[in-house]
């Protein structure tokens, strides 16, 4: 029993810290730390820097361009990056479709797609949810009908994050209506630039364009874009969900946000004293800090087991539930901390190169939008209720 | 980063668990509660022969030199079986007072007697009206003809009547809430002028009110530095808290197992009630709380041996706060999931709930430790001696 990092891990952390200090562009870090809007260019610029260093896909096997780090080292890397204000690597390519391709794809698919994921040449998005298929994903209706050497795809995906920037989409499509609904699903890679693909923005309650509807109207997709076998898509999707999921707790990011919350609470005044000295507010922060500490140790327990050769399964659902609750509480307390100055709605104020005048402190401007936006985290990636179903079935056997 | 147990730690855990499975059924426990002493001498002898009573102190005094992690493993097992005996008060709190604060003579006389089971101890730290403030000590001692004369009163002395010797924080200097001016004394409850009242607590244990009315004791009864006892008191209380945190985790583990079993066997509307999603999700939530509590108990067990007092205080209070919250939630929800059966005295569920409720209160509840967590950073550091070297005997 030892809660300390080994000297090897500490040296590794120093190495990552030095790299991030040296290479993370200041303008990008500032946007992250100040909760400003990030563009595709920001995300891709940082990903290319990581790629150049060979650190874009730490969890991949080394033969495909991974780093060969232990689970604990990957956690250290995520944490150092997050604390410095690096944007998260967009998950769809590196964390989601990449592992599916390398596990179930053929050699032509591997040699074509994997390097383009690593280099950010292809920007990926995920085509799972449909208007009638949310938590009950297996009921999906987007159809792919084989005609000679291609599939013809018709249907609609929704909540497609960053589809407006994407070159490629990995989709679950229905190739058969026979048998169990899960058995008629296939995993198909589709070029977003194909004729018949239409992307329509969905504006969310924070006023932002982050997600989209994606329509497929007789889209022709070459059969070589099918991953694995027809009808096995559900299995691949489940594999994807169990892959590298400890990051889902976002402990590093939450530690950074907790620090920012305290900074704000020291700045804001109540009765002529810093808000931080108001016991009622202070207690909420302290409780959250303790919750985050408990989550962090739980993550480390899961990672240590991973290092010992027991990769996390349904335990990741527990991390997702607690991690997202904490992320939401952080945004809630930040908005609460700025009081009246959370109210002004100036969406330009959290974009690039804004020269206008803030109503309150600059840090207050994006906090309401961020609070509203973060309600998503307990919904996406399997709602927290679905996560509870998973724990109930897989861990508790109910 | 390593969360595994050594082979010896695994053996320790298994041997305690085996012993309790054999000697501490729910019915046996019920009989112990009803007994005059409120504890079992046979069980205590069993603990001695397993080597559990010397767990926390140096092999130089017949102990085993265990760390916070060994204490955690034992306390989890005691929690699973709702053990009533004065283990934490004797072996964790008071033995640590002697180990870290006692002089050579005190260690040599007392520690081997703890190890062999012939002496039990209680910590008499609480006073009426002081709530959870360790520094609030109004019991006084003054010197008279080479003797100390004690006056005052202690409340909720857990296992007080079972104790052969009390460890008593006394004000020898300063104002009632000063940290400086507190000294620790051994007091024999049989001494003239010591009054007491033994009573049961709702968790099946015993506690006592103890009064001191011109109690004369010799200078050899002082433990450690005169007027400088607070640092020692705080550090051993942290050990006791870490131990209680582990006990709570053991309680939650057993309670959750029994609750899950109930959901799988109790049938309503023609199906096991565990088929209902409202109950499934609640069961998941108490499982999650258990995992969070377990993480914090590990944190406390490891950090309680830290020589950095600020680090130790922060971790121990964070653990007690989080586990207090978890204990309340798990206890309440487990009763709810058991329905009417959860309300009965017959089922263990209610007994776990009551013990979990008690643990939240002992040494300060979640609210108290939320304050302490926050204050830890700004509190002057109390440095501790370096940790004991572990030297396990095979048991």
Image (spheres, coloured by chain):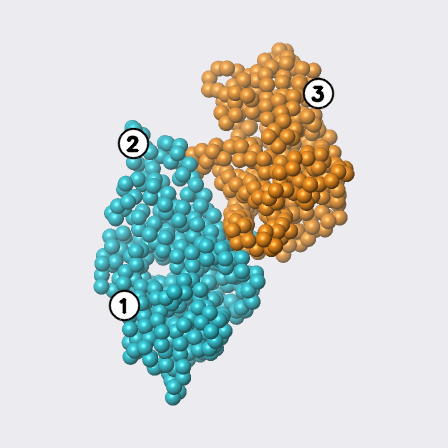
Q: Is residue B179 above or below residue B265?
A: below
Q: Is residue B282 above or below residue A150?
A: below
Asked if both marks, 3 and 1, belong to the same chain, the answer given is: no
Q: Is residue A188 left or right of residue B212?
A: right
Q: Are marks 3 and 1 in contact (CB under 8 Å)?
A: no
Query: Residue A266, percent across and down?
Result: 62, 53
Q: Residue furthest bottom?
A: B145
The chain that hosts pointer 2 is B
Residue, x 34% and y 41% (percent of image)? B336
Residue, x 30% and y 36% (percent of image)? B265
Residue designated by label 1: B197
Foreground residue among A209 and B131: B131
Query: Residue B393, percent across and down?
Result: 42, 65
Q: Is residue A396 left or right of residue A351?
A: left
Q: Is residue A48 above or below residue B327?
A: above
Mark on residue A193? 3
Q: Quadrant of the C terminus of chain A?
A: top left
The chain that hosts pointer 1 is B
In the picture, residue B22 is in which quadrant? Answer: bottom left
Query: Residue B131, percent across and down?
Result: 41, 62
Residue, x 55% and y 40% (percent of image)? A328
Q: Is residue B351 left or right of residue A218?
A: left
Residue designated by label 2: B268
Q: Residue furthest top?
A: A147
Using the rendered image of the protein, determine whether residue B8 is visible from the camera's viewpoint: no
The chain that hosts pointer 3 is A
């Amino acid at each position: 029993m030892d809660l300390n990092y080994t000297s090897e891990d500490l040296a590794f952390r120093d190495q990552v810290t030095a790299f991030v200090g040296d290479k993370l562009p200041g303008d990008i870090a500032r946007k992250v730390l100040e909760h400003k809007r990030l563009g595709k260019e920001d995300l891709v610029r940082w990903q290319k820097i990581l790629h150049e260093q060979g650190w874009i896909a730490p969890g991949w096997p080394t033969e495909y361009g991974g780093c060969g780090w232990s689970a604990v080292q990957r956690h250290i890397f995520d944490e150092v990056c997050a604390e410095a204000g690096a944007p998260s690597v967009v998950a769809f390519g590196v964390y989601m479709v990449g592992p599916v391709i390398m596990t179930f794809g053929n050699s032509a698919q591997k040699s074509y797609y994997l390097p383009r994921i690593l280099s950010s040449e292809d920007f990926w998005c995920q085509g799972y949810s449909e208007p009638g298929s949310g938590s009950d994903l297996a009921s999906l209706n987007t159809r792919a009908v084989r005609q000679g050497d291609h599939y013809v795809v018709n249907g609609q995906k929704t909540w497609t994050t960053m589809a407006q920037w994407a070159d490629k989409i990995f989709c679950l499509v229905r190739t058969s209506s026979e048998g169990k609904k899960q058995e008629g699903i296939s995993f198909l890679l589709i070029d977003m630039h194909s004729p018949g693909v239409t992307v329509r923005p969905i504006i969310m309650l924070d006023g932002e364009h982050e997600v989209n509807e994606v329509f497929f109207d007789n889209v022709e997709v070459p059969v070589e874009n099918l991953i694995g076998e027809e009808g096995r898509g559900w299995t691949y999707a489940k594999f994807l969900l169990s892959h590298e999921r400890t990051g889902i707790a976002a402990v590093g990011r939450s530690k950074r946000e907790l620090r920012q919350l305290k900074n704000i609470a020291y700045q804001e005044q109540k009765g002529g004293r810093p808000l931080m000295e108001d016991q009622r507010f202070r207690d909420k922060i302290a409780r959250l800090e303790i919750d985050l500490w408990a989550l962090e140790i739980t993550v480390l327990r899961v990672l240590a087991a991973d290092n010992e050769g027991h990769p996390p399964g349904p335990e990741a659902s527990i991390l997702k539930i607690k991690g997202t609750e904490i992320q939401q509480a952080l945004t809630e307390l930040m908005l609460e901390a700025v009081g009246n100055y959370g109210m002004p709605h100036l969406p330009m104020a959290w974009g690039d190169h804004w020269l206008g005048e803030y109503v309150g402190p600059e840090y207050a401007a994006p906090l309401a939008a961020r609070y509203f936006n973060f309600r998503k985290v307990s919904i996406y990636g399997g709602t927290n209720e679905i996560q509870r179903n998973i724990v109930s079935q897989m861990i508790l056997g109910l | 980063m390593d969360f595994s147990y050594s082979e010896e730690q695994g053996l320790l855990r298994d041997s305690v668990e085996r012993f309790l499975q054999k000697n501490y059924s729910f019915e046996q426990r019920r009989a112990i509660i009803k007994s005059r002493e409120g504890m079992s001498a046979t069980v205590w002898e069993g603990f001695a022969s397993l080597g559990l009573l010397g767990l926390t102190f140096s092999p130089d005094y017949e102990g085993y030199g265990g760390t916070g992690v060994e204490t955690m493993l034992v306390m989890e097992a005691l929690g699973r079986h709702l053990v009533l005996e004065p283990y934490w008060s004797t072996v964790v709190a008071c033995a640590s007072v002697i180990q870290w604060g006692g002089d050579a003579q005190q260690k040599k006389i007392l520690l081997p007697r703890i190890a062999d089971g012939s002496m039990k101890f209680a910590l008499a730290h609480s006073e009426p009206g002081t709530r959870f403030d360790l520094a609030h000590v109004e019991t006084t001692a003054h010197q008279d003809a080479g003797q100390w004369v004690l006056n005052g009163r202690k409340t909720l002395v857990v296992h007080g009547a079972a104790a052969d010797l009390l460890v008593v924080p006394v004000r020898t200097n300063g104002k009632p809430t000063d940290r400086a001016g507190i000294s620790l004394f051994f007091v024999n409850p049989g001494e003239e002028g010591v009054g007491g009242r033994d009573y049961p607590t709702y968790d099946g244990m015993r506690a006592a009110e103890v009064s001191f009315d011109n109690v004369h004791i010799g200078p050899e009864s002082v433990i450690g530095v005169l007027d400088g006892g607070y640092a020692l008191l705080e550090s051993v209380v942290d050990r006791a808290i870490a131990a209680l945190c582990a006990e709570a985790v053991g309680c939650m583990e057993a309670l959750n197992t029994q609750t899950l079993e109930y959901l799988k066997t109790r049938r309503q509307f023609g199906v096991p009630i565990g088929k209902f999603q409202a109950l499934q999700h609640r069961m998941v939530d108490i499982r999650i709380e258990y995992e969070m509590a377990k993480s914090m108990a590990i944190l406390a067990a490891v950090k309680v041996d830290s020589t950095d007092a600020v680090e130790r205080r922060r971790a121990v209070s964070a653990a007690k706060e989080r586990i207090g919250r978890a204990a309340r939630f798990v206890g309440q929800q487990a009763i709810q999931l058991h329905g009417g059966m959860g309300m009965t005295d017959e089922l263990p569920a209610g007994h776990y709930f009551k013990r979990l409720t008690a643990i939240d209160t002992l040494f300060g509840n979640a609210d108290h430790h939320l304050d302490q967590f926050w204050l830890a950073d700004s509190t002057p550091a109390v440095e501790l001696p370096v940790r004991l070297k572990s030297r396990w005997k095979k048991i």
